[in-house]
Image (cartoon, rainbow, N blue to C red):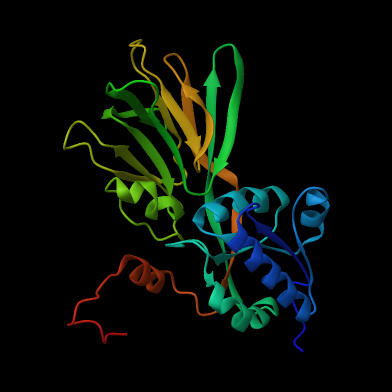
């Protein structure tokens, strides 16, 4: 049997979902057959399981991967995804592949990369600032009102524009295939340190997405006391509410997420498959 590089594995699986629980049990048994000390990480004993692990495996869709990413960064562990959802831009292995490929992957026949994260800081005049990190995106969107939301954006202290619409997305290259893409933003190679600025349903047709350097510091604020506010979320998790007199600061995090992929991982092949690029008759035989 091949010597495994990852001998202690923690499995993160959503509780209360029968199909995912069954898949996690099958994965656990398979890992034990391969000679790994594996455990499904859950309370009690969650922190000790994660502390001892050399690898975290997340089971589910991209939502499960985003939740697992927070845990992996907190504990400084590499992360591998088993896709049990629909698209699965982040989780590489399908359920039908993990048994056939896991042995070689655990022995070190894999590809590793580090992905940029965003750091969000929501300042509040009378309270402590709220902070979070995001692998995909930081989103500010209309809260409690149907009227247009105005958000002023500055980059490195220089005013870019005042956006009028439903809100605003700041996305990493990883998150460029998520909410930002649905708002017309570009797909960005995840090897790049870059931030996509994408307005949500802009009122003006010339309000277009913009890609800025990962070194840049973005600030969003509400420019006038109109009573409007914006709900702020990081990877879909609520951070707080942005109101007039406050500011949302977004910059590159000092932490990165280490992702583990199968050795044949190809980002652009994944995009072709997930987005059905070039499926017409003229190109279906192309490599």
The image quarter containing residue 3 is: bottom right
- Is 70 on the left-hand or right-hand side of 151? right
Residue 183 appearing in the image: yes
Residue at image coords 33%, 51%: 181
* Vertical arrangement, residue 130 with respect to residue 245, above or below: below
Residue 58 appearing in the image: no
Question: Could you say where residue 227 lies in the image, as x and y percent from the top left?
Answer: 36, 12
* Vertical arrangement, residue 224 with respect to residue 78, above or below: above
Depth check: give the residue in front, 257 or 26.
26
Residue at image coords 82%, 48%: 44
Image quadrant in which the N terminus is located: bottom right
Image quadrant in which the C terminus is located: bottom left
Q: In the current view of this chain or complex, which residue is farthest to the front?
A: 18
Question: Could you say where residue 183 lies in the image, as x and y percent from the top left?
Answer: 29, 45
* Vertical arrangement, residue 225 with respect to residue 220, above or below: above
* Vertical arrangement, residue 283 with respect to residue 134, above or below: below
Depth check: give the residue in front, 16 or 82.
16
Depth check: give the residue in front, 262 or 23.
23
Question: Could you say where residue 125 lies in the image, as x and y percent from the top left?
Answer: 54, 13
Residue at image coords 65%, 66%: 22
- Is 281 on the left-hand or right-hand side of 166? left
């Amino acid at each position: 049997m091949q010597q495994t590089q990852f001998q202690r594995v923690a499995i993160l699986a959503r509780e209360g979902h029968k199909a995912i629980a069954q898949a996690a049990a099958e994965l656990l048994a398979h890992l034990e057959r391969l000679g790994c000390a594996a455990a499904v990480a859950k309370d009690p004993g969650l922190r000790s399981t994660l502390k001892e692990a050399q690898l975290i495996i997340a089971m589910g869709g991209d939502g499960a991967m985003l939740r697992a990413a927070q845990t992996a960064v907190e504990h400084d562990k590499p992360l591998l995804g088993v896709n049990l959802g629909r698209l699965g831009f982040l989780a590489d292995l399908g359920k039908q592949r993990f048994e056939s490929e896991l042995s070689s992957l655990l022995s070190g026949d894999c590809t590793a990369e580090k992905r940029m994260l965003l750091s969000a800081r929501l300042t509040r005049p009378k309270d402590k600032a709220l902070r979070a990190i995001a692998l995909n995106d930081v989103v500010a969107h209309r809260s409690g009102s149907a009227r247009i939301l105005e958000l002023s954006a500055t980059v490195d202290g220089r005013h870019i524009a005042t956006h009028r619409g439903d809100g605003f997305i700041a996305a990493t290259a990883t998150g460029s295939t998520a909410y930002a893409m649905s708002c017309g933003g570009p797909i960005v190679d995840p090897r790049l340190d870059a931030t996509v600025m994408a307005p949500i349903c802009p009122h003006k047709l010339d309000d277009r997405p913009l890609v800025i350097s990962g070194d840049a510091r973005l600030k969003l604020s509400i420019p006038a006391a109109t009573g409007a506010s914006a709900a702020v979320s990081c990877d879909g998790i609520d951070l707080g509410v942005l109101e007039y007199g406050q500011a949302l600061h977004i910059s590159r995090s000092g932490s990165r997420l280490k992702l583990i992929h199968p050795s044949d991982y190809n980002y652009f092949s994944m995009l072709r498959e997930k987005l059905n690029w070039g499926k017409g008759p003229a190109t279906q035989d192309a490599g």
